[in-house]
Image: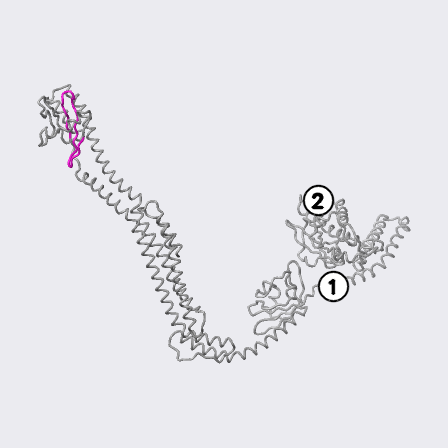
C-alpha cells in the first residue's frame, strides 16, 4: 500500500504541466491501485479480529465462519463499490476533461476569433469599397463637375451599390480648413469633426485607406486627389451587439483559462474524496460482518460440538434448548430429530448392508465364473447388470453395456422379452457375424433376467459332422456301382458298335452319354470324399506370394476378358502352411469370383470384370489375403454360404466354400465376407504367422499327403 501511494505521488508530481489534467484512465487506475490494497488491509484487520473472537469461543476454532462472513460482506461491498468508483471517477474526469480539453478551449477561441474576424472582415470590406469608390468617382469627375446632377447621381449610385450608409468628399483649402464638397446622407458633424488631423497625417504618410471602428459604424478615409488634398469619407453602420460580443468572447475566454488552471486540483480532490468514502464503506461492511458472525456463531457452536460427537459415533447427543423460533432454532430442532432417527436406523442399516454385501459378492463370484451370458434388465428394457460372458457374446468391443437400452444392444433379445417367452433359440447379429443363442428368460417385479449360451459353433460343428457323414455314405453307396456301369458302357461301345446296323449313331450317343454321366458322378463322389476325409495338412515354409499368383494365373489364362491384379506386402517372405490346401482354397475363392463376375457381365453389357488380390501384413504376426471382385455380390442368406451344400448356382454342389472354411480353420485362421463398394464381394482370409510357426512339422515336405480335389462350389 505504501509503495502504491509513493508511486501515485510521483506519477502526479512528474507531469510536465502542473495545470494540465491527468489522463482519466491513469487516474482511475491509480485510484483503484491505492484502493484495493487499502481494502485488503481493512479485510485482513477484520479477519484477524474475527479469528481472535472465534478462538475465544467454545469450539476454539480458527474462525472460518467469521472469516467467511467478513470476506462475503467485504466482497459484496467492495466489488460494486469499485465498479461505482471507477464509473464515477471516469465520468467526472471525462466531463472535466471535455470542458477543459483542447477541443473546448479551441471552440471558445475559435468563437472569439470568428467574431473578431467577422468584424475585421467588415472593416477591410468597407476600406476596399472606399478605395474602389474613390477610383470610380475620379472617373466621374473627369467627365463632369462635382456640382453637376450627373455626378450626384453617380455618387449616390456608388454609395448604394457598395452598401454604404453615408459618404462625403472633403477638401482642405489653402487656409487649412476642411470643407464638404459633396455628401450623401450627411450626418450632424462638420467636416473638421469628421476628418481629424490624425487621419490626415496617416493618409499623408502614404496609407492608402484608414479604417476606424466605432460602436455603431465603420468609417473609412482615403485620398481622392492627393495633390489637391481632397479626401473621400465613407461609413457603414455596424451591428452594435456584434462589437460587444467580441469583447464578451474575450472576457469569457479569459475566465475559462482561469478555471482551466484549477481543473487539476479539482480532479485530485474529487478522487481523494472517492478514496476516503470507499474505505469508510468497506470498514462499515467489515464491522457489520463481525457483528452478524458473533450472533450466528453462538448457536452454531452448539451444533458443531454436537456434530463432532456424532462423527465420533455418539448418536445419543442432542442440542440443548430452549430454541429460539428462528432458522437456527428450527435447525437445532431438526438436528435433534435427525440424530434420534439416525440412532434407530443405523443399527438396522449396518445389518442390512452386511447382508447385501455378502449377497453381492456371492452373485458376482458366480456370474464371473459361468460361461453363459447373463443380462438383468428393468421394466423399461434398460440393462442394469451384465457379466463378462454377455459382454463378449453380444459385442465385439469393450464398451460397457450397463444403462444402455436392450433394443440398442440386441433387438432380437428385446423382442423375446416383449413376447413374454420363457426360453427360445434365437439368432442375433453382432457386427457382420450371425450368432445363435439358447436363451432363457426369468421375470420378476423389477424386470427380467436373461441367460444365454452361444451355440453357434456347436451347431456349425454338428452340421459339418452330419454333412461329412452324409457325404461319406453317399460316396460309399454311389461309388461302388459306378465302375461296373462305366465298364459295361465301354464294353458295349467296343463289342457291339460294329454289329449295330440300324440307327448306329443313336447307339453311339447313348453309350457316350452313359460314360460321360458316370464320369460326372465320379467327380461329384470324389468331391464328397474330399469334404468327408480332408487329408491332414502338412505344414512347412512356403512362399505365399507364389501360391497366390499361381491361383490367379490359372484363371487369368482361362478368362482373358476379366482384368486380374495382384499386390503383396510380403516381398517374397515365406510362411508356414500346407501349400496344396492353401492353393486349393485360393483357387476355389478365385473361381467363385470369376463366376460372379461372369454372371454380372451377362446382365450388364459393357461392364469390365475386375478381380484383385492383395496380401497385407497388418502387424503383430497377422496376415490377410483380400480378394475383391465386381460381380453380382453376396446372396441374401450370406451367413449360410459356408455351410455344406449351400449354393446359389444350379450346377454347384455347395462344397467349395465349406472346403475353404475347413482349410482356413485347420490353419488357425478366419474367413469373412463383405460387400465391395460399387457392387461385388470382398473375401478376407486372416492367418496368424506365430500360430503357424508353432505347428511346422520337420521334414513335412517329404510326407506323402492324400489327394485333395479343388473344385469350386
Helix, strand or loop for the magenta stretch, by majority: strand
Above or below, 199 against 591 in this view is above
| Depth order, front residue of 633/14 | 14
Of the pair 605 and 245, the residue shown nearer to us: 245
Circle 2 is placed at which residue position? 563
Q: Position of residue 117 (x, y in %)?
A: 24, 36
Chosen colour scheme: one colour
Image quarter (top left, top right, bottom left or bottom right) of the N terminus: bottom left
The one nearer the camera, 189 or 56, is 56
Left/right placement of residue 148 relative to residue 413 reads left
In the drawing, what numbered circle is on residue 45? none
Mark 1 / mark 2, whichever is N-terminal: 1
Could you say which quadrant of the image residue 692 lies in?
bottom right
Q: Count neighbours of disc 2 (C-alpha within 10 A) and say few if under 14, some if 14 to 19, many if 20 or more.
A: few
Seen at 85% across and 50% down, the residue is: 507
Which x, y percent locates residue 212?
17, 32
Q: Which residue is mark 1?
A: 461
Circle 2 — which element?
Answer: strand
The percent position of residue 488, horizontal first and vertical second, equals 88, 55
Q: Which residues are magenta?
A: 211-234
Relative side of 339 to 634, left or right: left
Amino acid at each position: 500500500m505504501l509503495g502504491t501511494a509513493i508511486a501515485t505521488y510521483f506519477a502526479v508530481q512528474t507531469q510536465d504541466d502542473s495545470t494540465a489534467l491527468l489522463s482519466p484512465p491513469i487516474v482511475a487506475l491509480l485510484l483503484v491501485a491505492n484502493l484495493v490494497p487499502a481494502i485488503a488491509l481493512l479485510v485482513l484487520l477484520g479477519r484477524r479480529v474475527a479469528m481472535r473472537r472465534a478462538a475465544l469461543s467454545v469450539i476454539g476454532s480458527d474462525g472460518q465462519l467469521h472469516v467467511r462472513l467478513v470476506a462475503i460482506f467485504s466482497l459484496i461491498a467492495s466489488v460494486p463499490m469499485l465498479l461505482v468508483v471507477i464509473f464515477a471517477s471516469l465520468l467526472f474526469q471525462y466531463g472535466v476533461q471535455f470542458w477543459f480539453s483542447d477541443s473546448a478551449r479551441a471552440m471558445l477561441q475559435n468563437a472569439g476569433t470568428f467574431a473578431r474576424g467577422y468584424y475585421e472582415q467588415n472593416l477591410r470590406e468597407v476600406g476596399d469599397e472606399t478605395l474602389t469608390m474613390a477610383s470610380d468617382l475620379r472617373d466621374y469627375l473627369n467627365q463632369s463637375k462635382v456640382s453637376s446632377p450627373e455626378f450626384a447621381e453617380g455618387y449616390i449610385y456608388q454609395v448604394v451599390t457598395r452598401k454604404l450608409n453615408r459618404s462625403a468628399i472633403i477638401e482642405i483649402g489653402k487656409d487649412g480648413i476642411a470643407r464638404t464638397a459633396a455628401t450623401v446622407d450627411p450626418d450632424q458633424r462638420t467636416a473638421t469633426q469628421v476628418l481629424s488631423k490624425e487621419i490626415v497625417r496617416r493618409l499623408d504618410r502614404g496609407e492608402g485607406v484608414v479604417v476606424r471602428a466605432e460602436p455603431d459604424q465603420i468609417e473609412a478615409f482615403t485620398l481622392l486627389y492627393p495633390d489637391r488634398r481632397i479626401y473621400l469619407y465613407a461609413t457603414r453602420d455596424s451591428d452594435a451587439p456584434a462589437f460587444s460580443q467580441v469583447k464578451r468572447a474575450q472576457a469569457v475566454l479569459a475566465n475559462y483559462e482561469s478555471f482551466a488552471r484549477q481543473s487539476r486540483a479539482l480532479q485530485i480532490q474529487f478522487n481523494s474524496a472517492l478514496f476516503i468514502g470507499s474505505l469508510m464503506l468497506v470498514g462499515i461492511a467489515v464491522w457489520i460482518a463481525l457483528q452478524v458472525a458473533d450472533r450466528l456463531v453462538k448457536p452454531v457452536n452448539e451444533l458443531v460440538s454436537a456434530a463432532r460427537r456424532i462423527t465420533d459415533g455418539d448418536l445419543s447427543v442432542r442440542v440443548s434448548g430452549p430454541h429460539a423460533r428462528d432458522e437456527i432454532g428450527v435447525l437445532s430442532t431438526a438436528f435433534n430429530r435427525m440424530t434420534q432417527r439416525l440412532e434407530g436406523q443405523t443399527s438396522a442399516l449396518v445389518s442390512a448392508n452386511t447382508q447385501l454385501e455378502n449377497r453381492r459378492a456371492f452373485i458376482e463370484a458366480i456370474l464371473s465364473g459361468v460361461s453363459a451370458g447373463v443380462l438383468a434388465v428393468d421394466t423399461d428394457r434398460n440393462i442394469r447388470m451384465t457379466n463378462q460372458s454377455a459382454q463378449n457374446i453380444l459385442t465385439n468391443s469393450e464398451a460397457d453395456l450397463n444403462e444402455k437400452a436392450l433394443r440398442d444392444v440386441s433387438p432380437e433379445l428385446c423382442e423375446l422379452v416383449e413376447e413374454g417367452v420363457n426360453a427360445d433359440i434365437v439368432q442375433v447379429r453382432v457386427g457382420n457375424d450371425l450368432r445363435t443363442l439358447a436363451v432363457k428368460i426369468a421375470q420378476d417385479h423389477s424386470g427380467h433376467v436373461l441367460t444365454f449360451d452361444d451355440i453357434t459353433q456347436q451347431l456349425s460343428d454338428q452340421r459339418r459332422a452330419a454333412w461329412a457323414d452324409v457325404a461319406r455314405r453317399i460316396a460309399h453307396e454311389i461309388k461302388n456301382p459306378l465302375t461296373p456301369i462305366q465298364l459295361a458302357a465301354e464294353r458295349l461301345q467296343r463289342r457291339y458298335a460294329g454289329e449295330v446296323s440300324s440307327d448306329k449313331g443313336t447307339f453311339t450317343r447313348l453309350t457316350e452319354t452313359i460314360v460321360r454321366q458316370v464320369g460326372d458322378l465320379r467327380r461329384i463322389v470324389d468331391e464328397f470324399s474330399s469334404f468327408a476325409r480332408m487329408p491332414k495338412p502338412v505344414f512347412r515354409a512356403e512362399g505365399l506370394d507364389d501360391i497366390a499368383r499361381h491361383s490367379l494365373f490359372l484363371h487369368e489364362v482361362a478368362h482373358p476378358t476379366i482384368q486380374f491384379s495382384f499386390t503383396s506386402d510380403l516381398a517374397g517372405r515365406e510362411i508356414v502352411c500346407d501349400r496344396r490346401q492353401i492353393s486349393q482354397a485360393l483357387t476355389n475363392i478365385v473361381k467363385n469370383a470369376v463366376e460372379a463376375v461372369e454372371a454380372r457381365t451377362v446382365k450388364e453389357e459393357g461392364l469390365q470384370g475386375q478381380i484383385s488380390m492383395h496380401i497385407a501384413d497388418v502387424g503383430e504376426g497377422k496376415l490377410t489375403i483380400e480378394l475383391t471382385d465386381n460381380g453380382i455380390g453376396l446372396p441374401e442368406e450370406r451367413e449360410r454360404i459356408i455351410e455344406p451344400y449351400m449354393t446359389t448356382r444350379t450346377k454347384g454342389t455347395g462344397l467349395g466354400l465349406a472346403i475353404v472354411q475347413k482349410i482356413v480353420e485347420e490353419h488357425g485362421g478366419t474367413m469373412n465376407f463383405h460387400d465391395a463398394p460399387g457392387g461385388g464381394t470382398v473375401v478376407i482370409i486372416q492367418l496368424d504367422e506365430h500360430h503357424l510357426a508353432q505347428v511346422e512339422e520337420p521334414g513335412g515336405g517329404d510326407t506323402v499327403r492324400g489327394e485333395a480335389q479343388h473344385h469350386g462350389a
